[in-house]
Amino acid sequence: MSENKTGPTDVDVRGWLEAVEHPVRRADGLTLHEMMSRITGRPAVMWGPSMVGFGEYHYRYDSGREGDALAVGFSPRKSSLALYGLTYAPESTLLLDALGKHKRGAGCLYVNTLADVDSAVLENMIEVSYPYVVGTLGV
């Protein structure tokens, strides 16, 4: 069985975020860093070259594949912010309706900027998603 391509690294998260070239992505990344740290109570960890994660969980598929993944997190990509782990909790569907401008991917949300979304709703999504991912999806 192959290893996961993305795992935790020792890269300094704050330094990495401060080096993000795009000024809006940099500012949004620093805001998400503070928000997710405060809500989860977990330190930020770089996962692979560009994902910032908070907490982790172990998964096992019926196929036998298993591994570790970040519980919630984000990546300040050039085209948008990718938000991870926020769509799995049962409450997420209703919260997504109130979030603001976003797109859904397979396992993540994409927002252009944090200014496009309701920050209270985003905080609520993190509050319900983090314990759900860690406590329900993990094995």
Image (cartoon, grey):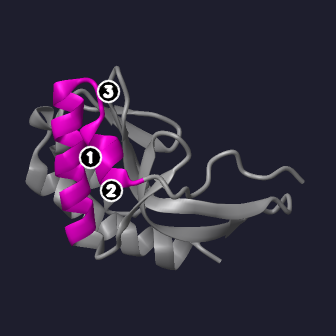
Q: Residue at x 85, y 58 (%)?
A: 63
| Image side of residue 75 versus residue 4, left or right | left
| Image side of residue 18 versus residue 83, left or right | left
Number of other residues with Cα within 10 Å of mark 2, as a class: few under 14, some 14 to 19, many 20 or more: some
**Dot placed on the residue nearer the N-terminal end, 2 or 3:** 3
Residue 105 versus residue 9 in the image, above or below: above
**Dot placed on the residue nearer the N-terminal end, 1 or 3:** 3
**Residue at label 3?**
80
The segment highlighted magenta reads 12-38
Q: Nearer the viewer, mark 1 or mark 3?
A: 3
Q: CA distance from mark 1 to mark 3?
A: 17 Å
Secondary structure state at the residue bearing disc 3 = loop
Question: Number of marks in the image?
Answer: 3
Q: CA distance from mark 2 to mark 3?
A: 20 Å
Viewer-nearest residue: 50 or 2? 50
**Residue at label 1?**
96
Q: The C terminus lies in which quarter of the figure? A: bottom right
